[in-house]
Amino acid sequence: MPLRSAIGGKGMAAETQAPWGRPVGNRPSPDPVALKVVTAVLVAPILLLLVLHVRSSWSDISGSLGELLAWTAALALLNVLEIPSWNGLALTPDIPLGVALSLLFPPLTAGLAALVGSLDREELMGRKSLVRAVFNRGNQAVGITLASLAAHMLTSDPSNLSMTALACAVAQAVWTVES
């Protein structure tokens, strides 16, 4: 007898729900249509902008590709690490690295690294839908791009320590407010 009919036709997912109403298991819950529309409207422009940036600036990007890949891999690794907090939430230690990315690379290149390197455990384990993963990655790309733009507007000379420190603070503030 199939499992579905053995438990009254509802299936296991209906029987195992977390207290907040989301199904427990490995599959992500279906995304509402509104989230899909918002994701398409908000993320499509940054994705298009990043693709155009790669096409137009490939010679500059390829010149520092090894460094960019190392920073992107480090960001991805830090995003996968979770530090438990007192309230049951998990924090990720990626903020200092994101601020460094925003200072070291041009804004759209830093945004590209954020888009690729912004993943989390839920995404790796298949518990986050593609729409939510794209939304989160696009949001991180926008945040790092804006943070980098703000930092680069303040200083282009890293030897000026006071302006670099101010640029770091502004980049972190912009990224925090955007997120």
Image: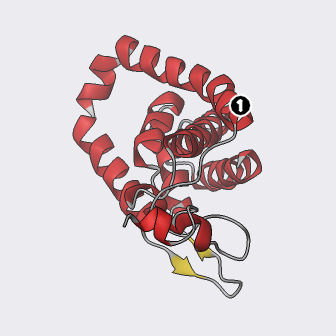
Q: Quadrant of residue 65?
A: top left
Identity, as a three-letter code, of the amino acid under mark 1: Val
Q: Which residue is mark 1?
A: 38
- Residue at image point 51% right, 18% down: 48
Whether residue 31 can be seen here: yes
- Residue at image point 47% right, 39% down: 115
Q: Position of residue 153 (x, y in %)?
A: 66, 32
Q: Does residue 131 appear to the left or right of 175 in the view shown?
A: left
Nearer to us in this view, 96 or 26: 26
The relative height of residue 82 versus residue 120 in the rendered view (above or below) is: below
Q: Position of residue 62 (x, y in %)?
A: 25, 27
- Residue at image point 47% right, 61% down: 122
Nearer to us in this view, 115 or 170: 115
Q: Quadrant of residue 165?
A: bottom right
Q: Position of residue 20 (x, y in %)?
A: 73, 71
Q: Which quarter of the rendered picture does the N terminus lie within?
A: bottom left
Q: Which residue in the rendered view is the most extreme toward the front?
A: 1
- Residue at image point 65% right, 64% down: 22
Q: Secondary structure at mark 1?
A: helix
The relative height of residue 138 versus residue 41 in the rendered view (above or below) is: below
Q: Neighbour class for label 1 at 10 Å: few (<14), some, many (≥20)?
A: few
Whether residue 93 can be seen here: no
Nearer to us in this view, 169 or 175: 175
Q: Position of residue 98 (x, y in %)?
A: 52, 53
